[in-house]
Amino acid sequence: MSDSKTLTLATESNREERAKGLDRKRYQWYHDYIHGVPTLRNATLGDGSRALGEASPTAQDVNAPHPDLADLLLSDAQNNELTRIANEQGEEALHDPNVLAGNPVFARPEEGATRDLVGKILSTDGYDNQTGVPLVDVPELASYILPRVLYVGNSADVSKKLIKDNKPLRSPADYKVMYEAYLKDSERFTRVGKKVIGFDQLPDVFNTDAMFGWQRLAGCNPRVVQGLTSDRAAALLQKMPLTDDHVAAVAGAGATIKSEIAAHRLYFCDYWLLDGIPVQEGRFMPAAIGVFWSDAKSQQLTPVAIQLGQTPGRIRTPKEADWDVARVLFSVADFNYHEMGTHLSEAHFAQEAFAVATRRNLPVNHPIGALLLQIYWALLYNNALGRLQLVNKGGFADRMMAGDLEKGSLRIVADYYAKVWSFNDWDLENYLGRQGTLDTQGLPVYPYRDDGLPIWRAIKAFTAEYVGAYYNDAPNVAADLELKNWVDELYQEGKGNLAAKGFPQTVTTKEQLADVLARLVWQAGPGHAGINFSQFQFFSVVPNAPGAAYATEGGLMKVLPPLEKAAYQGDILNVITQKVFGRIGQFDSSFHEKLNDLGKNAVMNYQRALTACATAVDERNGRAPRKGQSYPFLHPDNVPNSTNI
Ligand SMILES: [Fe+2]
């Protein structure tokens, strides 16, 4: 049996031969790009050193071949062709699948691309509508779609038009025109999860306490909310003078902080990490704290109070005239914490060490290496793109977020990695347990938890079965020197640097290996999806969550971003939620073919479990309170295997 056609562990005799396939020169560690975050050196699309602080990325940067995924890059020829089509036929033409499908510049003759295939991919998300079978392997799919996505992103067509029309923004409702333009765009452009029941009207209803509370549990950043325990209350009350009266005003006469803590009904979000982060001139981002009460009747979170800072100050409550300003300033904090912390730092950059160590240590026909390559196929490329277009000078963060780019926004990325993120956070059950949000009595409806935990359990069962397919017993795991190299390198200082991040020093049992893998599989797919694709619904409605505040008082319209910043925010969020490449539990045929029978069974059982998860999500979405505001973001149909956008 040929070694390359099956997944095998190394033997004494072939270990050296297998090591020759690893390209350690290409995949070198780097720790300085974003201070302290281990990443891949030269993982930029061009000269990465320029991305931070000197110049914006150029077409040349985007076109320079990335060592790993050169295929996916927008080539000069494709770029020129898109420009030509847009000039001659209008930008509308770029949304017509037939225009690009028949264009030889976008065909890949060596793979026999045809008009039919590309047209089908664009109209079906890459899956056969009847059978659900992937039409092509995911990287191949992305190579057709990404150039278009990037072009749409670069062209920023909605914002350009709005800015040209220059209609003055007089009320929050005037921002609605942008959201409507994106929704219209989404009808033409294939993507998943944009049309969400209850949210097409968000521009009209964002300004309510119910929607504000809902977003803590089912919005872009559903991992921040914590249960208020007696221990946490002691620390919180030292910096925020919350009183029983504040709680009683929402929870009813007689309710006290103590009584509601005992009933597990008090929750809070604390953006302490933003304290002291330098902001750009004229922009504001308070290190807000918000306290919420879990209403048993409506099964939703109701805001109790907000404090816009980390030292005792004015407590703002829903009855006050400028409550809408307090709420939006809190949302600015949430937006910045989400984008630089939860999203870029944790969901993208923290995964990079694992992708790098995998390519340096695990051959492609190692069972663990092959599985990990399935979930890391686009990560390095995608992160490189993020560095060039999101946190570069003149890019997303610089243009419309509050923090000073290098001293502020990038510091949040680094601080989040150093002070917040831990490898244990990718065990969802463990994480929610520590957050104090597992209790279904106190917090009966928490869509991120309710849909996330069944997927997490399906993943755990899958990795346990998968590991069992290739390792017979504990000594078998301990004897796998390739795996040991991978673990060692992730743990070591100067390489993965994960010793202080909860990553184990040794992995010697099947249980331990399955546990490590489960966390990685979770984070690459649902972990990222749960905080990424919801950005469209919530963050492209700019008055709901602006990237920066432009005043801290004087009414909502003074605080909200001007037209140009708002339109740019909408454009970018539209792009980074554009497309779900791949589907959780669906692996490339090249991987599937190499599995042994037990491995194939593991995949089949995993897919069955995910189908059951999907049915349960549909059922929960049909029941109050989700009936009127569904939660599609952890529906397995909307969750990819990998982090790729
Ligand atoms: Fe993302």
Image (spheres, rainbow, N blue to C red):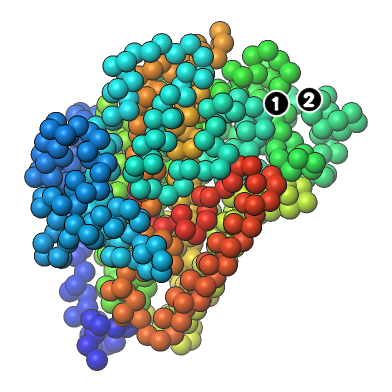
Residue type highlighted by circle 2:
His
Relative image position of residue 49 (x, y in whole percent) = 20, 38
* Crowding near the residue tagged with mark 2, few <14, some 14–19, many ≥20 C-alpha atoms within 10 Å: many
Q: Quadrant of residue 95?
A: top left
Whether disc 2's CB lies below 8 Å from ligand 1 is answered: no
Relative image position of residue 340 (x, y in whole percent) = 42, 37
**Residue at x 61%, y 61% (from the top left corner):** 616
Could you tell which of marks 2 and 1 lies nearer the N-terminus?
2
The answer to whether the residue labelled 2 contacts the one labelled 1, judged by CB atoms less than 8 Å apart, is yes
- Residue 195 vs residue 189: left or right? right
Looking at this view, is 616 or 511 the one in front?
Answer: 616
Relative image position of residue 138 (x, y in whole percent) = 30, 61
- Residue 145 vs residue 610: left or right? left
Relative image position of residue 580 (x, y in whole percent) = 38, 52
Q: What residue did someone put label 2 on? A: 246
Residue type highlighted by circle 1:
Ala
Q: Quadrant of residue 600?
A: bottom left
Toward the right, the furthest residue is 254
**What label does residue 305 carry, if any?**
1
Toward the bottom, the furthest residue is 1
Q: Is residue 208 visible?
A: yes
* Crowding near the residue tagged with mark 1, few <14, some 14–19, many ≥20 C-alpha atoms within 10 Å: many
- Residue 496 vs residue 247: left or right? left
Quadrant showing the N terminus? bottom left
Q: How many marks?
A: 2
**Residue at x 70%, y 47% (from the top left corner):** 624
Task: Give the SS element for disc 2.
Answer: helix
Task: Give the SS element for disc 1.
Answer: strand
Q: Is residue 467 visible?
A: no
**Residue at x 29%, y 58% (from the top left corner):** 120
Looking at this view, is 182 or 311 the one in front?
Answer: 182
